[in-house]
Amino acid sequence: MSILALFDNKGKLEYVVRNYDDITKSLKTLGVRFERWETPYILSDDANQEEVIEAYKDYIDKINKEFNFKSLDVVSITKHHLKKEELRTLFIKEHTHSDFEVRFFVDGSGTFCLHIDDKIYVVLCEKGDFISVPANTKHWYDMGSQPFFKAIRFFSIEDGWVANFTEDNIPNLVPDHDRITSL
């Protein structure tokens, strides 16, 4: 079940939303698009990028028609991934992008944390969730200590994922993915 948790900039929990429609409405006020898409395909844990893209070709074509993305890839990380700790350390640092960040989770889960004004909006995304974070929004992504997710990433720039790190320590003030899943 997807979750939205709101924290102040000191890390104090203000509220938790579990109702999907309420999560969508709350995020929409921030310019964040959040939708639930069907995930009818059962993919193996080790499905490669080509298999995921082929399975979700109709979804990819639909979103590409809307946004004319220049590139896409599939990020798939499990607890057995050789670089899981290195990647978690990279993604969990607060950063921005000049491009909007668009993800469609086709399996597993991960947590997007959005630092907007003096609030932190923590969004637990699960299989079927589509999220689009506006460009220049301070955020980070936590896949947890035992990651399991597969997501299609869409980019409107050829370079793909390019982060501008803020060096802010705020990610340490809110619960990580492992604790968010137990809220």
Image (cartoon, rainbow, N blue to C red):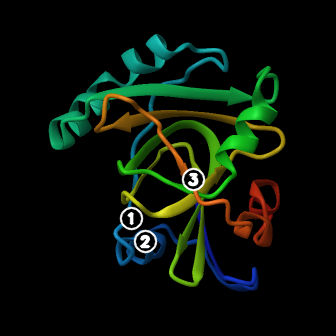
Mark seen at residue 32: 1
Residues under numbered marks 1 and 2 in contact, where contact means CB atoms less than 8 Å apart: yes
**In the displayed structure, would residue 174 be above or below residue 71?**
below
Judging by the rendered image, the residue that carries numbered circle 2 is 27
Distance (Cα) linking label 3 and label 1: 13 Å
Which residue: 68% across, 53% down?
A: 93
Distance (Cα) linking label 3 and label 2: 13 Å
Q: Earlier in the sequence, mark 1 or mark 2?
A: 2
Mark seen at residue 137: none
- Local packing at callout 2 (Cα closer than 10 Å; few below 14, some 14-19, many 20+) is some
Q: Quadrant of the N terminus?
A: bottom right
Distance (Cα) linking label 1 and label 2: 5 Å
The kind of residue tagged 3 is: Cys
Q: Earlier in the sequence, mark 3 or mark 2?
A: 2
* 171 displayed left or right of 22: right
Which residue: 48% across, 71% down?
A: 23
Q: Secondary structure at mark 2?
A: helix
Q: Secondary structure at mark 1?
A: loop
**In the displayed structure, would residue 170 be above or below residue 181?**
below
Judging by the rendered image, the residue that carries numbered circle 3 is 125
> Based on the displayed image, in which of its 4 quarters is residue 33 positioned?
bottom left
Q: Nearer the viewer, residue 157 or 4?
A: 157
Image coordinates of residue 135 in percent, x first then y, are 37, 57
Which residue: 49% across, 16% down?
A: 49
Q: Earlier in the sequence, mark 3 or mark 1?
A: 1
The kind of residue tagged 1 is: Val
Image coordinates of residue 12 in percent, x first then y, are 76, 85
The kind of residue tagged 2 is: Leu
**In the displayed structure, would residue 39 be above or below residue 13?**
above
